[in-house]
Image (cartoon, rainbow, N blue to C red):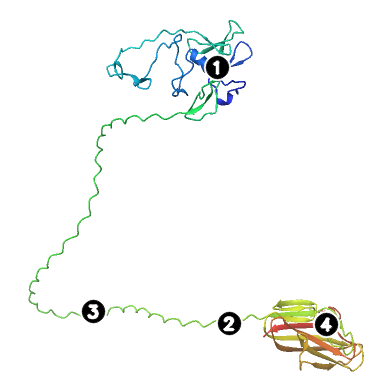
Amino acid sequence: MPNLPISQLPNLSGATNETLLAVVYSGGGTPVTYHITLQDLIQSIPFGTVYQTIIPDVTNTYDLGSASSTFRSIHVGEGTVFIGESGALGIDPEGILFSLSGFASNTLVLGGVINSGVTTTSGATFSLNEDYDVIVTNPTNTGVTYNITQQLVTTGGTIGQVFTQTGNTNFEWGWTTLSSGTSGTSGSSGTSGSSGIDGTSGTSGSSGTSGSSGIDGTSGTSGSSGTSGSSGTSGSSGTSGSSGSSGTSGSSGTSGTSPVITARYYGAFYDGGTQNLLAANTPQVMSADTTTLSSGVVLSGGTKFVALNPGVYNLQFSAQLNKTSSGTDEVAIWFRKNGVDIVESNTEMQVAKQGTTGKLVAAWNYVDQLNANDYLEITWASADTTYELLYQPAQTVPYAKPSTPSIIVTMTQV
């Protein structure tokens, strides 16, 4: 029969409680599944190989063979065949069979075995051929022999379990865990191995230190002095020796301290439009609409020059006054701090009209101590509303000149 993986085994269906395994045969028509019970296996020629201990679920109840159906031979290993609760058969080293109560015959003779096919409860006959293949004969097709092509194996057990009968009636079957057998005695120790080869010699040690030198011998006596020879002529003067090296340089003086540079805040602004005096005898603040430089000083609301950091600041301005009438009223200009007039900061002037207009530049500065976010304003007023702060665009005739802002303001920290 071919070996099939578990994934290819067909599912069991229609099995009864007595079914031990199911097989599918083919070759003579449509494949048919048969159920084989334990009774079928006991009555048939040995079916397969046993891979575990066979243990009945009830003691002293079932038989191995019968008076009319006997086994031909029983082969067992060295050990004891137990009979009942206390009786046992064994064999001595000489091959003599004995019992616990004395020696017996050295042979055990059983009746002959009849080899014939067995008809199962399903109606098919099972038998073995000379190649030990299981042959199925279908009674519905007389004279046709079928070879088993698939064997359906009951699944569900785990490693170490056997499929065995678990009940007394109706051939109830299930998976049972095997108990481990006792360990055999330890074998005798092997002989000792031969000794290993000698290791290589170690390196030579370092040389010892040299011994101390011997004592010097005594000097011999000096010989007598010889007579002095005549003086020779004087030799020429030797060349002058080379100049001595220069002396070492003196140590450098300490470096001077760097000046401390303190950041200064500033802002520069102007206005690019003419500013009219809107009402007579009503103070009005001058305004700017453009910032050209700014660092810590900003323009707020068009009229407020704000110091973002505390310090002393210098506010300087120039305003292009213009008068379109011939009246002689004066114009007053002063400063405000945080919206309050600054005492003794007012200056008055009178613009005389010449021709169609009368122009005059009002320009001076004011220095004050400011806290963070304090601001300064420039205020002006007159009884004559023909005064204005005049803006003039750039001109090219009679010569090129840039535009004239109505007011220029700078505020710097000092």
Which residue: 24% across, 47% down?
202
The residue singled out by tag 2 in the image is 260
For the point 41% across and 30% down, the residue is: 180
**Residue 368: image location, x then y, percent:** 71, 88
For the residue pair 344 and 170, the one nearer the viewer reads as 170
Tell me which label, 1 or 2, sits earlier in the chain. 1
Left or right: residue 256 versus residue 216 is: right
Helix, strand or loop status at disc 3 = loop
In whole angstroms, how far apart are the C-alphas of marks 3 and 2?
A: 73 Å
Q: Identify which amino acid the numbered label 4 is placed on.
A: Ser
Q: Is residue 402 above or below residue 153?
A: below
Residue where numbered disc 4 is placed:
406
Label number found at residue 289: none
Q: Please, what secondary structure does the residue beneath circle 2 have?
A: loop
Disc number placed over residue 235 in the picture, else none: 3
Chain-order first, disc 4 or disc 2: 2
Determine the secondary structure under disc 1.
strand
Q: Position of residue 70 (x, y in %)?
A: 43, 11
Q: Which of these two is toward me, 63 or 354?
A: 63
Q: Nearer the viewer, mark 1 or mark 2?
A: 1
Q: Distance from label 4 to label 2 (Cα)?
A: 39 Å
Q: Residues within 10 Å of mark 4 (few under 14, many from 20)?
A: many
Quarter of the image for residue 229 reads bottom left
Residue position for label 1: 36
Q: Tag 4's secondary structure?
A: loop
Quick one: label 1 or label 4, which is nearer the N terminus?
Answer: 1
Q: Amino acid at mark 3?
A: Gly
